[in-house]
Image (cartoon, rainbow, N blue to C red):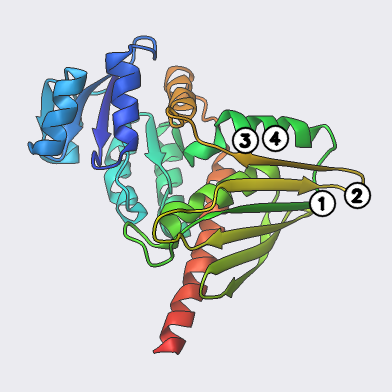
């Protein structure tokens, strides 16, 4: 399986190249081409992974690859980058977030459906062992009545503000809380952005904490029913992107997305509401 990568500045790409090309741990899958042109970053990745082809523009990957990873750190670019490959029927993994608007996310899903091209997107933390363990433990008690997830996120950060890191906590919360989104409310302080909403029959609270100058809080999740509570600190390991990468490779081989397309939209719906509230708060402050 020949894989091309769009958006190589993302540190996740280092893990992908190491796992597939250096360790050869992804079966027959190899990164064979990078977009973004020659430069220090791409030259280093190419040397590390034995990647012979570096093209200037994403479209240059067409005809060279069997599947594509879109890893640009700003979700606002993902629609333009992903749709040409979906239109050719190629499997596409869009690294988090799928987009920065529901309209962009829907456009990619529509293109995937129209051309029979499997599409997936997720936070890498969705698949790590700690999250898997919490999901399994929570499932034993049935659908939770309350889910609370906390993690760092900077609404003023580069690469899309609250979307860039906020997607981690929101995606984890929604893996634990199935169902349609309603009643999104955002409360903002100097140090936190708190999103609360209902997903199906589950009340969800996501606490996004602005990182300090040197440290940031860990990711943590709790689920509650009337009779039980499960909780876990979610710690990314050195290869935290690998489980999500393997889910993508399985999709590329089978044609079956690991996440339903409705579930791809839900975190974007929540974060679009949060981003709008942050924009309104910023305008009021001015």
Residue 67 seen in this snapshot: no
Does residue 118 appear anywhere in the picture?
A: yes
Q: Dot 2 corresponds to which residue?
A: 226
Mark seen at residue 135: 4
Q: Earlier in the sequence, mark 3 or mark 2?
A: 3
Please tell me whether residue 15 is drawn above or below residue 223 in the rendered image: above
In the rendered image, the residue lying farthest to the right is 227
Q: Give the Cα separation between the discs numbered 1 and 2.
A: 7 Å
Please name the residue shown 63% across and 47% down the image.
220
> Which callout, 1 or 2, points to the residue nearer the camera?
2
Q: Which mark is residue 131?
A: 3
The residue lying toward the viewer, choosing from 62 and 52, is 52
Horizontal and vertical percent for residue 170?
A: 57, 52
Q: Quick one: label 3 or label 1, which is nearer the N terminus? A: 3
Check whether the beta carbons of the residues at disc 3 and disc 4 lie within 8 A of each other: yes
| Residue 79 pos. (x, y %) | 34, 50
For the C terminus, the image quarter is: bottom left
């Amino acid at each position: 399986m020949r894989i091309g990568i769009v958006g190589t500045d993302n540190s996740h790409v280092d893990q992908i190249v190491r796992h597939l090309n250096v360790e050869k741990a992804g079966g027959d899958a190899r990164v064979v081409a990078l977009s973004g042109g020659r430069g220090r970053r791409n030259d280093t990745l190419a040397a590390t992974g034995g990647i012979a082809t570096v093209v200037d523009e994403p479209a240059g990957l067409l005809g060279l690859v069997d599947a594509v990873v879109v890893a640009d750190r700003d979700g606002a670019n993902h629609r333009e980058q992903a749709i040409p490959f979906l239109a050719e029927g190629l499997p596409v993994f869009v690294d988090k977030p799928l987009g920065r608007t529901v309209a962009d996310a829907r456009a990619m899903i529509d293109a995937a459906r129209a051309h029979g091209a499997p599409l997936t997107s997720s936070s890498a933390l969705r698949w790590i062992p700690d999250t898997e363990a919490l999901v399994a433990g929570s499932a034993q008690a049935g659908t939770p009545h309350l889910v609370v997830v906390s993690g760092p996120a900077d609404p003023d950060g580069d690469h899309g503000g609250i979307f860039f890191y906020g997607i981690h906590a929101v995606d984890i919360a929604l893996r634990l809380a199935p169902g349609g989104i309603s009643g999104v409310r955002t409360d903002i302080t100097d140090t936190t952005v708190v999103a609360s909403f209902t997903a199906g029959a589950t009340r969800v609270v996501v606490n996004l904490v602005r990182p300090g100058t040197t440290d940031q809080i860990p990711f943590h999740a709790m689920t509650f029913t009337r009779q039980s509570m499960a909780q876990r600190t979610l710690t990314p390991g050195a290869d935290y992107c690998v489980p999500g990468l393997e889910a993508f490779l399985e999709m590329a081989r089978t044609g079956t997305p690991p996440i339903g397309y409705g579930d791809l939209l839900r975190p974007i719906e929540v974060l679009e509401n949060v981003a709008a509230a942050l924009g309104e708060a910023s305008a009021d402050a001015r």
